[in-house]
Amino acid sequence: MRQLALPFVRRPEYRGADFIAAASNAEARAWLARAEDWPDGRLALAGDTGCGKTHLLSLWAGGADAVWEGPFLRGLPAFSGPRLALDDADSHPDEAALLHLLNHARETGIRLLLAGRTPPARWPVRLPDLASRLRAVTTVVIGAAEDDLLAALLARLFAERQLNVSALVQDFLLTHLPRTPAALREAVARLDRRALALGGRISRPLAASVVAELADPTEADER
């Protein structure tokens, strides 16, 4: 008998102990440790989805609640703290608000950390003043994840969901999935839902079915 897999929302905690340090994020970590050296008090982190940008922003800002989200930036609320982090800044819908934020941070001495999939100089903006300021932002690119990082991340993702998955199955996933953190997160989420619905363990055949789905974008996931 199949079980109903309820769509529980999982909110990441972004704890310091959970961040996986690697060569690919070493430069970013070094820059975040010396905010006093940022040119004009600004820094941007760039990298693919799932590379750890949000985790780093949360640790630097002092908690997830201290991180603003670019898509919801609408004007500038009152802010007087010493540092401010803006995630998904490349997805902002209000260029005037982002320009205001950059100007406010510079005038008040606030350390401003931005994050996006690409460097700010490549963001498609229309306001000349905003484009000029974004080109001047020092950017650190988080590189592609290493083998050790991916293996540690996969093990942690299963542990967070209290899933006991054999080393053989994890090795299979690491070998056949796209080599990105985002792909691992999606695969683990699907495997969790599928195993719960079927009432069984995460086996190699089940893992193979999810790998096949992710390889074919037209294949629908069972919800």
Image (cartoon, rainbow, N blue to C red):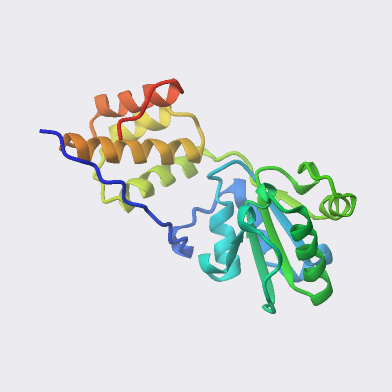
Q: Quadrant of the N terminus?
A: top left
Q: Nearer the viewer, residue 123 or 24?
A: 123
Rendered location of residue 119, percent (x, y): 74, 45
Name the outermost residue toward the bottom. 80
Q: Is residue 108 left or right of residue 210?
A: right
Q: Residue at x 37, y 21 (%)?
A: 212
Q: Quadrant of residue 4?
A: top left
Rendered location of residue 143, percent (x, y): 63, 42
Above or below, 176 relative to 138 = above
Above or below, 193 relative to 17 = above
Rendered location of residue 32, percent (x, y): 66, 63
Q: Is residue 130 left or right of residue 87?
A: right
Q: Residue at x 15, y 34 (%)?
A: 2
Q: Quadrant of residue 184?
A: top left
Above or below, 101 relative to 174 = below
Rendered location of residue 164, percent (x, y): 24, 44
Q: Is residue 184 left or right of residue 125?
A: left
Q: Nearer the viewer, residue 107 or 34?
A: 107
Q: Nearer the viewer, residue 92 or 13?
A: 92
